[in-house]
Image (cartoon, rainbow, N blue to C red):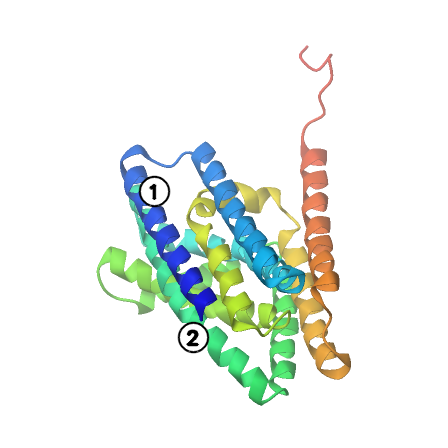
Amino acid sequence: MLKWIALFGALAVLLTFDLWLARRERHAGMTVRAAALQSAGWVAVALTFGGVMLALLGGRESGLYFAGYLVEKSLSLDNVFVFLLILTSFGIPQADRHRLLTWGIVAALVLRGLFIVVGATALHHASWIAYVFAALLIWTGWRMFRHRHDSAGETAFVESLKRRIPGRLGTAALAALVVADIVFAIDSVPSILAITDDPFIVFAANAFALLGLAPLFFLVADLVERLYYLKTALAALLVLIGIKMAAGELWGKLGPEVSLPLIAAVLGVGVVASLVREREREPATSPMSGR
């Protein structure tokens, strides 16, 4: 119980700080440099929490947290593109987007907390549900792979939300963000439950991955274009996690000493391949090119 109180207290402080940043940026504006620094800062906060877990709970728990955080943070890179479409489609001014995203994160934490409790409880009482989650992850990975280089599905989804959600501009956009996150949770929560069914670790990994969402939002347009193979890597990762979840029920779960390097390797290959592609696309330069 004490660790839950400490986690909720830390999240309350961090979310209050994020709202203060949003209020300040409403007047000063968010620059790319500020977004990059804030994103790095939120990652540092998440890593610090993992270090605290390592000191207090041990290497296994912290390893599971880092594996879950890496999966959730990577999925958020793809999910935040939909948030960009939502806020643009609803005509939300740049100055109001950080604040709206922060309140969306608060709602997402509550909803994901419920999803995590229900999912973890279901796994404890009916282990066969792991096969349902595994099938969902594999199907989601296949669907993501098929649409890895287009955004037609995301655009259609956002337009559908805009037609169905009435109300004031900001309220309707916030409702759309919450509905979108519910859809995302159907994929992301099973993916981390395949790593561990400890509700504290699952919720902490989700929470710290979501905390950096607002500044990441301002970088995502550039990141999505540069990380061309990100969706391919995420699709492969979801399929592997689904297979791992099903295999875990048959032959026993893999520990974090296997999960964490595997997740890092798959994502690393996607990032490196994207950077190589980006470099090859750049026009060749030479000392004679200025002529």
**Residue 261 location in percent, x, y?**
73, 56
Q: Is residue 187 above or below residue 267?
A: below
Q: Is residue 285 above or below residue 185?
A: above
Quarter residue 86 falls in:
bottom left
Picture quarter with the C terminus:
top right
Residue pushed farthest right? 251
**Residue 218 location in percent, x, y?**
44, 43
Rate crowding at label 1 as few (under 14), some (14 to 19) or many (20 or more) other CA atoms within 10 Å.
some
Return the disc, 2 or 1, that comes first in the chain's sequence: 1
Residue pushed farthest left? 168
**Local SS, label 1:** helix
244 left or right, relative to 15: right
**Three-letter amino acid code at the position of disc 2:** Leu
Picture quarter with the N terminus:
bottom left
- Whether residue 179 is visible: yes
Residue in view at x 60 percent, y 85 percent: 129
Q: Which residue is mark 2?
A: 114
**Disc marking residue 256:** none
Q: CA distance from mark 2 to mark 1?
A: 28 Å
**Residue 88 location in percent, x, y?**
37, 50
Q: Which residue is mark 1?
A: 21
Residue in view at x 53 percent, y 45 percent: 44
Residue in view at x 46 percent, y 56 percent: 210
